[in-house]
Amino acid sequence: MKNIIERNKDKMIKDVLDIVSIESVHAEKLEGMPNGEKVNEALEHILKLGESYGFKTKNIKGHAGVIEYGEGEEYVAVLGHLDVVPLGEGWKYNPLGEIVEDKIYGRGTMDDKGPMIAALHGLIAIKEMNLPLKHRIRLIFGTSEEIGGPDIENYLKHEKGPIMGFTPDAEFPAIHAEMGILVLRISKDITNKNNLEIKGGEAVNMVPEKASISYDIDGKRFEKSYKGVSAHGSTPHLGENAITKLLKDIDSFNIDETIKDSLREISYNLCYDLDGKVMGIDFEDESGKLVLNTGIISLKDNKLDVDINIRYPVTYKKDDVVPKIEKIFKDKGFDFRVVTSDKPLYYKKDDKLIQKLMKVYVDETGDEREAIAIGGGTYAKAMKNVVAFGPQLPGRPDVIHQLDEYILIEDLVLCANIYGRSMIELSK
């Protein structure tokens, strides 16, 4: 397998650059394109690529795509997504793909386009080796993971699920436990007396790198911007939240005092810690501590909306977290709703799926660490019998959702080998 993947390395690099060049950020729904034109372009591109390598393909009504090899009633799966978070501003390298020395830069190189191309080249090697397999192998490409969309839900309306599989949507080694995830919206109708506007954040699962406030005062327009450092919403301590900076500065602005009171409540409860301690939800277990990210704020006309992203430990439940936050804000006159809710995911370390993946990982890397628990939630939650497995190797910096996202070419090749061998193990 390694010889085949090495021989095809240049093709694999080109395939990564080609798919990364498509800015597949979720956009307005169009006919046959539930996540917009660019996401659909990426989906059509990957299916044509699969066909060019001699595989069967299928488009699941624009929500997902399939590249398939082998025969059999049941199948094993590699599940990844083609949609990406917004590019953001301030890249040193081309966010739509550029090779610099030993790295491929671009949005999606790590999450998830690069590793899914690695999986495709692992499958190409399996096809060339013509190994006998008990089960079919499917690469499943979703289209709305970054917005918590219904791509895999729609897939499962038309296709049955795999007997087992993995998603290259996190880090190595195999992940046996994932925290629960909540997206909550806190809203309030306000009387906006001086054309006040506040905005910040692009995606609730990203630490916002920009926020701004503007309003009219004495016939002039006052404006101030704040700059943060982007990071994934599951690791907000690695970034700097621009919304937090703005809200902590709220007393310095010449705006209506009642609006200030509302913003102070947001600031006090959401901006002074990253584990919910102020609100009494700082839970912790073997999977880690609860994590809180204030991801988006919008105040315009007569409406204030704040979206927050919470990751809670695997031994806790939604009802341990939500009622406390709801009471705090409803008591202060805010509206409150749960936008999305994903339960924790948990497999024992001696589960057959975990053991198979860990064997391949140890054989390929020599790293004998155990399966891990993470605070982030992955695509594995979208489909039963699937766990997260790579692509980030231990010790590598976390570049997912950040400026100048990249994948090392040597890691891309290693992923192709790990994923190829893992597909063989699962399909025996």
Image: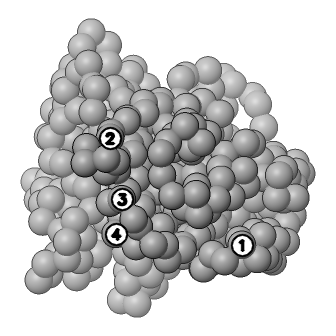
Q: CA distance from mark 3 to mark 2?
A: 10 Å
Between disc 4 and disc 3, the foreground one is: 3
Find the distance from the CA under tag 2 to the CA under tag 1. 28 Å
- Compared to 284, does 108 lie above or below? above
Residue type, numbered disc 3? Asn
| Residue 81: mark | none
Sequence-earlier tag: 4 or 2: 2
Check disc 1 and give the amino acid type.
Lys
Q: Quadrant of residue 145?
A: bottom left
Residue pointed to by mark 1? 332
Q: Which image quarter is the N terminus in? A: top left
Lower position in the chain sequence, tag 4 or tag 3: 3
Residue 194 - label: 3
Question: Marks 4 and 2: which is nearer the front?
Answer: 2
**Labelled pair 4, 2 in contact (Cβ < 8 Å):** no
Secondary-structure class at tag 4:
loop
The foreground one among 29 and 45 is: 29
Marker disc for residue 222 = 2
Q: Amino acid at mark 2?
A: Phe
56 with respect to 86 (left or right): left
Q: Residues within 10 Å of mark 2 (few under 14, many from 20)?
A: some
| Residue at image coords 54%, 61% | 259
Query: Badge 1: few (under 14), some or many (20 or more) residues near its Cα, within 10 Å?
Result: few
Label 1, secondary structure: give it: loop
Residue 393 in sight here: yes
**Earlier sequence position, callout 4 versus callout 1:** 4
